[in-house]
Amino acid sequence: MPMIRLDKLLTDAGLATRSEARRMIAGGRATVDGSAVTSPDTKLDPEAAEVKLDGVPVCTRKLRYFMLNKPDGVVSATEDATEKTVLDLLPKELRRLGLFPAGRLDKDTTGLLILTNDGALCHEATSPKHHVDKVYEFTADGMLDEADIAAFAGGIVLQDGTVCRPARLAPDPADLSRGTVTLSEGKYHQVKRMLASRGAHVLTLKRISIGGLALDPALAHGQVRELTAEEKARLLEKVTN
């Protein structure tokens, strides 16, 4: 692993700008492997060194992975001239990491969205060759039955001729206007259009899992947290294999 400067490591971790990092280090706030370091240009191996700032361990991994519980009314983009984006929801220190959405959710769709600075993962997650299961919860204005379940399982052809891969529709037995849809692809407005083709127009839509990675139920709308090592491994296995 190439050696990097300590001030760059703190900057890459999203903890400070380069000038702020230099002042922090010069002020004796950083340690490397338990020893105080006051020289910002100290070089270290980010994979091997234990770095702390104010006694708190610093994540030295360059590639970062987060789950966001996307709220309604926010667009899945890094910037937009008129709309609030998912990056606008992040605290200042995370905005410095160069994160972007791996895939997208419609403006009015809520739930699980992965944010990362791993361009390879983003490419793989959105590539048509990878059929990663994504599960959505919905409420609709129509009742669904066994015929609708069979239609989804057989692969629906939309009104414009778009052919959808077989999908799993699971209505809630207690309320047939609610349920889940599991897709292995991500065409434009796909869940909404598939349900509309069966006479059930979507009222609310929420993504609850991607490739077996479930949205943390403790994560409120608009909140973000870093994936655990286990969650990251599960995501990478599903998306890249």
Image: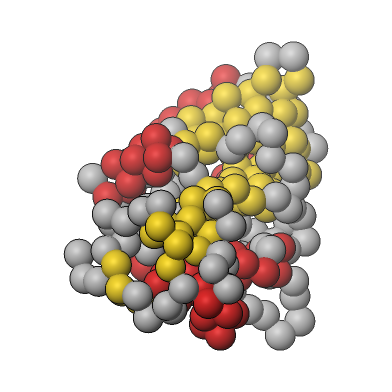
Q: Nearer the viewer, residue 143 or 49?
A: 49
Asked which quadrant contains residue 7, the reply is bottom left
Quadrant that contains the N terminus: bottom left
Against 142, is 23 above or below? below
Asked which quadrant contains residue 86, the reply is bottom right
* Residue 211 visible in the current orientation: no
Q: Nearer the viewer, residue 43 or 17?
A: 43
Quadrant that contains the C terminus: top left
| Image spot of residue 62 (x, y percent) | 38, 64
Name the residue: 71% across, 85% down. Answer: 81
Against 6, is 181 above or below? above
Q: Nearer the viewer, residue 228 or 134?
A: 228
* Residue 241 visible in the current orientation: yes
Name the residue: 55% across, 52% down. Answer: 55
Instruction: Give the color scheme: rainbow, by chain, secondary structure or one colour.
Output: secondary structure
| Image spot of residue 211 (x, y percent) | 41, 39
Against 14, is 129 above or below? above
Q: Is residue 68 left or right of residue 184?
A: right
Name the residue: 43% across, 78% down. Answer: 40
Number of numbered labels in the structure image: 0
| Image spot of residue 140 (x, y percent) | 75, 37
Q: Residue furthest left?
A: 1
Q: Nearer the viewer, residue 95 or 57?
A: 57
Name the residue: 51% across, 73% down. Answer: 25
| Image spot of residue 10 (x, y percent) | 48, 69
Q: Residue furthest top?
A: 174
